[in-house]
Image: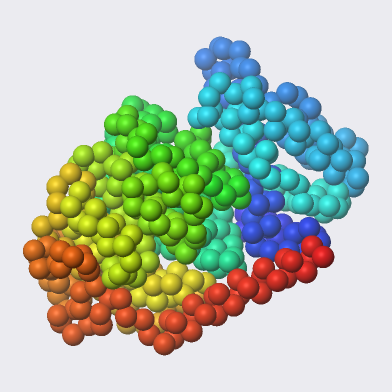
Amino acid sequence: MFEQAFKNIDDILRKESGCTTELDYTEQTSWLLFLKYLDALEHDNVMEAELERKKYTFILDKPYRWESWAAPKGRDGKLDNNAAMTGDDLRDFVNQKLFPYFTGFKQKATGPNTIEYKIGEIFGEIKNKIQSGYNLREIIDHIDELRFRSQNEKHELSHLYEAKIKNMGNAGRNGGEYYTPRPLIRAIVQVVNPRIGERIYDGAVGSAGFLCESFEYLKAKGKLTTKDLTTLQTRTFYGKEKKSLAYVIAIMNMILHGIEAPNIIHTNTLTENLADIQEKHRYDVILANPPFGGKERKEVQQNFPIRTGETAFLFLQHFIKMLKAGGRGGVVIKNTFLSNTDNASVSLRKLLLESCSLHTVLDCPGGTFQGAGVKTVVLFFEKGAPTRRIWFYQLDPGRNLGKTNPLNDSDLAEFVKLQKTYANSPKSWTVDAKSIDKTTFDLSVKNPNGGKEITHRSPQEIMDEIAALDAVSAEVLANIKALL
């Protein structure tokens, strides 16, 4: 039922001139889903208060509750068509009253980690793009079919929402910008092995895939106490995100996975000066796929000891600084980081090897990130002691990866298994840090078992990247033409 509701919503959004891409579909579905979720949360809170014989103070004033404006019901429990707005009345109410009301929540919130603050942030960053009040009425009716009451319902909704994010990532400018393949994330989480009580951070949170999968990983350990569950809800997952749409999606994704008030801040992480970071700001675990290929302004670069315009290199410096001594990181980065000869790359490799134990490098094949032709590696490191030896694993699923043939969990099973003991195999080998050139700190090591050098790209991979860049150019031109 839920799957059909999502399909129906997308079909209606395709009729809207203001919604032209998967990004728009996900954005518009998100704010309506969020309000439906708030309705379910308020109902649960009312019932809990009644059981405890307490009075419950509603988060939302009555005219702005879902049951008042979106889905007023008659005594039979069905939609009261006489009371339900539609057409221009509905559109005008949403644009002129509902959104301004929710935007004001940010000012009256007691802190950034409250649900009130999240409401204000979300509705301050997006707008209603559904121009037809009749289409909006239809979409609301489908959203109203969805239920958040049971864990099974939330679980199904979270899977459907993840599928929307995946589609958005595939159709977007850069697949890795919005969607890191979940099998890759799960493998990274298993290797880093976060524990209850540790604080987990992603400073380039995107759609919050790393935080959601970490939550699922920790919940699956079983036998969690009430204190453990409170710790997971309030003091475990932290993130920052620069882009408005990604911020909204991250909040919604975490809520659907069961984290009710996500500790996600809407900010440009890289504007924070590394010199200002203190011990109290640091984290036990960092898991991230920072954006690569971006260029940061000179004033942002001033915040970093190793100055470079490459966004991912600035993020890596930030992550190293943000880890506690003994803290563990799993970070995705372009594989050219291993061998680039520019001063920033050399200095950054030196910093990583000397301040952290870079114990594992996972080399991912082309096609891992659908829609992005860039090859990547995953760096696994622990802060506080210099690197002594590095275990390399060359992931080779034995087939070409792509949208119709994506990475799966079984592809990574051998990596996760061998990594526990750093075992050598036809796909894995160990390098002594003493053998690394101390002038270049080059990490592009050829597989001694006959594999390809891990910084080498095939002609097809290069062509894929050219195609991805062409798609970016085409989209930019289309947007320019639309504005003219």
Name the one closer to the observer, 115 or 316: 316
Q: Residue furthest bottom?
A: 459
Using the rendered image of the protein, determine whether residue 410 is visible from the camera's viewpoint. Answer: no
Please report the residue visible at 51 percent of the width from the left and 44 percent of the height from the top: 268
The picture quadrant where one finds residue 10 is bottom right
Give the left or right position of residue 387, taking residue 484 as reference.
left
Please report the residue visible at 31 percent of the width from the left and 43 percent of the height from the top: 321
Provide residue 215's location: percent of width, then percent of height. 39, 44
Provide residue 129's location: percent of width, then percent of height. 77, 51
The picture quadrant where one finds residue 24 is bottom right
Using the rendered image of the protein, determine whether residue 469 is visible from the camera's viewpoint. Answer: yes
Please report the residue visible at 43 percent of the width from the left and 60 percent of the height from the top: 310
**Dividing the image into 4 quarters, which one contains the N terminus?**
bottom right
Name the one closer to the observer, 224 or 399: 399
Give the left or right position of residue 23, taking residue 267 as reference.
right
Please report the residue visible at 73 percent of the width from the left and 23 percent of the height from the top: 61
Q: Does 338 sit above or below residue 227?
A: below
Provide residue 12's location: percent of width, then percent of height. 77, 60
Q: Does 4 sit above or below residue 48?
A: below
Give the left or right position of residue 420, taking residue 337 as reference.
left
The picture quadrant where one finds residue 334 is bottom left
All told, the count of numbered labels is 0
Give the left or right position of residue 271, taking residue 39 as reference.
left
Q: Does 366 sit above or below residue 34?
A: below
Q: How is the image coloured?
A: rainbow
**Dividing the image into 4 quarters, which one contains the C terminus?**
bottom right
